[in-house]
Image: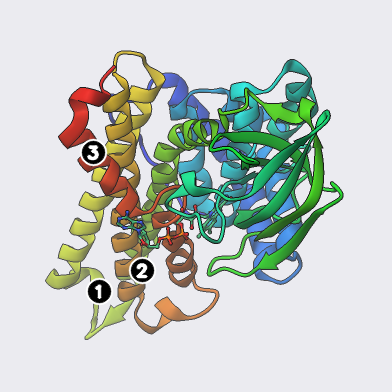
Amino acid sequence: MTEWVSPLPHPFLEDRHRVLAERLRGEWGPGLQNAQAKFDAGEFDEDSAARAFVAVLSREGLLEQVLKGGVRDLCVAREFAAGVSGFADNQLALQGLGSYPIALAGTESLKDRFLSPAERGEQLPAFALTEPEAGSDAGAVETTAAKDGDHYVLEGTKTLISNAGLASYYCVFARLAGSKDTVALVVEGQAKGLAVERLSVLAPHPIGTVKFQGCRVPSSQRLGDEGEGISLAFRTLEKFRPSVGAAALGLAQRGLTESREHVRRRQQFGRPLAKFQMLRQKLADMLVAAELAQLAVYRAAWLLDGNQANRSERAQASSLAKLTATEFAQQVVDETVQLFGGRGVLQGEIAERLYREVRALRIYEGTSEVQRLILAKELLDSDSNAE
Ligand SMILES: Cc1cc2nc3c(=O)[nH]c(=O)nc-3n(C[C@H](O)[C@H](O)[C@H](O)COP(=O)(O)OP(=O)(O)OC[C@H]3O[C@@H](n4cnc5c(N)ncnc54)[C@H](O)[C@@H]3O)c2cc1C
C-alpha cells in the first residue's frame, strides 16, 4: 500500500492523535483498500461497498472512538480514510453527520435506539436537510411537519441525501406546518410514506431524493424542542466542517504521493520527469498547498476542541479550513492528473479517481462561496457575533 500518511509534524496535534493515526493505518488500511478494490472490480455494488466500508471502519470499536472523540480525532480519521478511498471517507463522515443531531438533542431512549448503533456501525444514518428549492439557503426548507395527536405528519421532498435508500434512519429537518419554526425528527428508513429515488453522482456513493407523503413520525422521535430544528442542523454542520477539509487533505496528500512516484518512474526525452525543472516546480507548489491545507484544518480542529476561542473565531477558523483545504486539494489533484498525462484520465487510474472524488467537497456542507460569505460576515460584523 502506498505510504502517504501525514507525519503530522505540527503543534495542533498531541501524541494521542499520532497514536490514533498509526492504529487507523493498521486496522483500517488493508480492509478499506480491499473493499475499494472489490468495488473497482465490480464485485461490490454501491450499497454493498458502503456497508463493507462501514464494517471495516467499525472494527475494534474505532468508529465509536473516532466519532465520540474530539474534532481532531475525526480529522485524523477522515484524512487517513480519504487517502485510501474517498468513498470510504464518505461513509465515515455520514456515520457521524447522520447521527450527531441525536447526540446533540436526543433523549436517552433515542440515543440507545439510534445513536449508539450508528457509532458502532450497526446502522447507517442519513442527514436530510437539502431540498430542491433549499440548498445553500438551508433555512428555507419547505418540507412540513404537521402535528396530529402524538405524531407529526411529514410532507415534502429532500434531495441529494447521502445514504438515501440505505439508511436505517434519517434525521429530517422540517418546518412546523403553519409556522416559521423548524423541527428535527428521526424517521426510520422503513417508515410508511417515505419513498426514495436514487441519484448517480460523479464519484460513487449512495445518494438520492427522499419523498415524504403522509409520513407519520411519533413525537417521541423529535430532537430537542420545536423551533430548534435548523439550529441543530447548523450545529452539526459546524462540528463536521473542518473534517471536510481533512478529507480534502487526505485526497491531496494521496495525489502528491502518487505524483512523486510517477515523476520519478516515468521517463521522457531520456530522463525521468522528475528531472524537469518545470515539473519540479509543480511538485513544490503541490507540497505548499497540502501543507497550508493541513495547517488550516488542524488549527480549526484544535480551536474547536478547546474552549479558549469565541464563537466568531471558531466559525472563522472552520470556514477557512474547509475553504482552503478543499480548494487547494482540487488544485493538487488537478496537477496530479496533468502529471500523469493521458493515463491521468483513464478510468481505473488513481489520478482519475481522485479527480472525481475531490470535486464534491467544494460543494457539500456549505459551498466555497458560502464559506466566503461566512468569512466576510465574521470579518465585517464580528463585534455583533462575538460572545
Ligand atoms: C455528493 C453530495 C452529497 C450530499 N449529501 C447531502 C446530505 O447527505 N444531506 C443533505 O442535506 N445535503 C447533501 N448534499 C447537498 C449539499 O449540501 C448542497 O448541494 C449544497 O448545500 C449546495 O446547495 P445546492 O446544490 O442547492 O446549490 P445552490 O444553493 O443552488 O447553489 C448554486 C451555486 O450558487 C452559489 N450560491 C448560492 N447562494 C449564494 C450566495 N448567497 N452568494 C454567492 N453564491 C451563492 C453556490 O455557492 C453554488 O455555487 C450533498 C451534495 C453533494 C454534491
Q: Is residue 373 above or below residue 239?
A: below
Q: Which of marks 3 and 2 is nearer the N terminus?
A: 2
Q: In this view, does 56 lie above or below 272?
A: above
- The picture quadrant where one finds residue 176 is top right
Q: Can residue 149 be seen in this view?
A: yes
Residue 373's x, y, as percent?
27, 46
Q: Which mark is residue 377?
A: 3
Gap between marks 1 and 2, in whole Å? 8 Å
Q: Earlier in the sequence, mark 3 or mark 1?
A: 1
- The picture quadrant where one finds residue 45 is bottom right
Q: Earlier in the sequence, mark 1 or mark 2?
A: 2
Nearer to us of marks 3 and 1 is 3
Q: Which residue lies furthest to the left in this view?
A: 277
Residue pointed to by mark 2: 262
Mark 2 and ligand 1: say if the CB distance to the nearest ligand atom is below 8 Å.
no
Nearer to us of marks 3 and 2 is 3
Q: Is residue 345 above or below residue 127?
A: below
- Ligand 1 falls in which quarter? bottom left
Say which residue appears at 36% left-offset and 75% top-offset.
340
The quadrant of the rendering that contains the C terminus is top left
What's under tag 3, amino acid-wise?
Answer: Lys
Q: Nearest the camera: 315 or 386?
A: 386
Quick check: marks 1 and 2 in contact, CB under 8 Å? Answer: yes
Gap between marks 3 and 1, in whole Å? 45 Å
Residue pointed to by mark 1: 273
Residue 235's x, y, as percent?
48, 30
What's under tag 1, amino acid-wise?
Answer: Leu
Element under label 2?
helix
